[in-house]
Image (cartoon, helix red, strand yellow):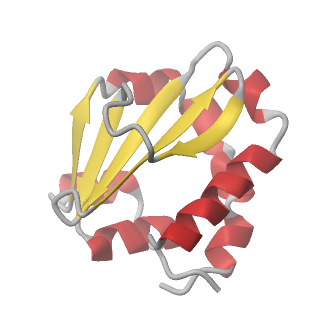
């Protein structure tokens, strides 16, 4: 069982994204790269969703991102578990966004389906 935000967990996240061969079709018109920074950048990864599908990018810290989510580990864990939604985290000041926030709206319908895709990872994660 991978520990949340560990290298093993990020690899499992990447594997889950790559396993959905329909992601590319969903994001071909609204590609997006979303960075997640946890604990002042101690953990940083990028979820890339485009015409090629989905993947986690860690090797290129300068990878161009559209939006960056910034929060502490507790908030990140609650968001990943689905016990806190992003809107509530934003309004309470626990989550900050940087970048082209309107890109989230453009990709919103395609992003909505990711919860089901990641259910297995969520169930197998040690939080």
The number of callouts visible is 0
The residue closer to the viewer here, 8 or 70, is 8
**Residue 107: percent from the left, percent from the top?**
54, 26
Task: State the residue at coordinates (62%, 42%).
Answer: 55
Q: Is residue 109 visible?
A: no
**Residue 95: percent from the left, percent from the top?**
24, 55
Q: Quadrant of residue 2?
A: bottom right
Task: State the residue at coordinates (74%, 27%).
Answer: 24
Q: Quadrant of residue 78?
A: bottom left
Is residue 111 found left or right of 73 in the rendered image?
A: right
The residue closer to the viewer here, 109 or 26, is 26
Task: State the residue at coordinates (64%, 32%).
Answer: 110
Q: Quadrant of the N terminus?
A: bottom right
Is residue 89 found left or right of 113 in the rendered image?
A: left
Q: Is residue 23 above or below residue 84?
A: above
**Residue 17: percent from the left, percent from the top?**
69, 48
């Amino acid at each position: 069982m991978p520990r949340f935000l560990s290298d093993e967990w990020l690899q499992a996240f990447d594997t889950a994204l790559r396993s959905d061969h329909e992601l590319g079709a969903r994001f071909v018109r609204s590609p997006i790269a979303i960075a997640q920074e946890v604990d002042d950048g101690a953990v940083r990864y990028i979820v890339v969703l485009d015409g090629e599908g989905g993947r986690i990018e860690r090797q290129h810290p300068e990878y161009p991102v559209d939006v960056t989510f910034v929060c502490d580990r507790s908030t990140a864990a609650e968001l990943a578990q689905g016990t806190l939604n992003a809107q509530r985290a934003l309004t309470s000041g626990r989550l900050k966004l940087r970048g082209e926030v309107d890109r989230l709206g453009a990709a919103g319908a395609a992003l909505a389906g990711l919860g089901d895709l990641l259910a297995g990872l969520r169930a197998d994660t040690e939080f």
